[in-house]
Amino acid sequence: MNKFIQTVKNIWSIEELRNKILITLSFMVIYRLAAQVTLPGLDGEVINDAMNASGGAKGILGMINMFTGGGFSRASVMALGVMPYISASIVVQLMGIAIPYLQKLKKDGESGQKKTTQITRWLTIAITLVQGPAYLASLPSLGIPADAFLIGTGGMFWITSMILLTTGSIFAMWLGEKITDKGIGNGISLLIMIGIIAGFPSAFAQEFVSKVTTGSSGGFMIILIEIIVWLLVILACVYLVTAIRKVAVQYARKTVAGTVRDVAGARQYLPLKLNSAGVMPIIFAQAIMFVPSAIQGANFSSDGVKNIAAMFADPFGVGYNVLFATLIIIFSYFYTAITVNTNEMADSLKRSNGFIPGVRPGKETGDMLDRILSLITFPGSLFLALLAVLPAFVVKFGVQQSWSMFYGGTSLLIMVGVAIDTIQQINAHLLNRHYDGLMKTGNKRKSVA
């Protein structure tokens, strides 16, 4: 404990790092405060009473509500949050495969990145203009009663709400970019994480009350077991995020200023991640799984279509999770293939006089890296699919739906991934100032003169 306290003191003693952390916390507080502001023309108290009476959004809507920190079900000005920006980023990334102009921007370095960011911003506004009306039209189905609409649902309500929803998404995007530039960690990911964490206390409180107030003497023991299992799942997520396959690489000797630098015997490693796609396969698969829910809510004359849609619309049902897991495995291979270019890795090794022992540089190296990546992606995708469907399993053991969402899926993987990334950035600042890392001892290192 003393070492941890000393590490915190070391973090606080670095002015630059302290300012970055304070900026990050300030922007996250602003985001959370903005998420509490209800759209004009709606009665916030009536909406809150209705949500509390119904237990909040359930199923697919509950997942969306989790990522917006409750703003989705509260009809907040930040109801869409950073979801339009995430959608725009995914679209731009996928279009970069087929559109030569975007491929050229990717190779142009910083100037190309700025243009790509600008395209993503404009696409975010366009997506908001599509998602906004769909959201406003679905407000009654979210459980918002008719008496919550103070000025009705006429043109004035739609115009003002669309302006504010678009402004809220742009503001969330701006906050995320500023956190990335001026603060610590990835801004957009941190905003998503803070929205997920916002629902954690209430979800755990509901689970605790439901188990302890049942009158059973084993209520506290059940809660303790659930916490232990939850911590084990977090540990599994950490292993999935950080697991790599090390490919041995050697570099040829180099002549510098008439001398030979003896690096031929020094072996380095090329890290290939077990889960190179991150949480993107889950996000892609979840976007497709919204379709059955939309079909179920639509007015189809065929009962057969509605019955099939209902079978795949329940996020805790067997049909939904089998299809969900299959899509995750497929998208894991797809996203890894479009984001990890093994031929470029092989060319980069060749240019730096590096080679894999026993393998020819160039095409053979690229083929070998591609084969290794394909082999490790399979267990990685299976592990990712298992974590994604884990909430459906724990629900069968009596865990409430709101609390079960923290046992896996996108929410837990995002929290673990963002936490690891942020800790790594803090560690980099500490090590640069000759301190031990956040996860190591807190003793000050001696600087080397």
Image (cartoon, rainbow, N blue to C red):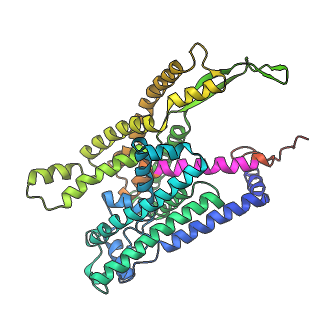
Number of marks present in the image shown: 0
Left or right of 149 in this view: 111: right
| Residue at the extreme bottom of the image, as rendered | 151
Q: Residue at x 37, y 80 (%)?
A: 160
Left or right of 365 in this view: 316: left
Q: In this orientation, which residue lies closer to the viewer: 69 or 372?
A: 372
Q: What is the x, y in percent for residue 121?
A: 47, 61
Q: Main secondary structure of the magenta part?
A: helix
Q: What is the x, y in percent for residue 358?
A: 58, 12
Question: Is 345 rendered above or below residue 108?
Answer: above
Question: Is 375 rendered above or below residue 330?
Answer: above
Q: Is residue 415 magenta?
A: yes
Q: What is the x, y in percent for residue 324?
A: 31, 43
Left or right of 307 in this view: 193: right
Q: Residue at x 38, y 65 (%)?
A: 128
Q: In this orientation, which residue lies closer to the viewer: 232 or 238?
A: 238
Question: Is 55 rendered above or below residue 378?
Answer: below
**Magenta part of the chain:** 412-430
Q: Residue at x 32, y 84 (%)?
A: 156
Task: Give the quarter of the figure containing the C terminus.
Answer: top right
Q: Is residue 442 magenta?
A: no
| Residue at the extreme top of the image, as rendered | 358
Q: In this orientation, which residue lies closer to the viewer: 267 or 7?
A: 267
Identify the image quadrant of residue 71. Answer: bottom left
| Residue 362 appears anywhere in the view | yes
Q: What is the x, y in percent for residue 96?
A: 44, 45
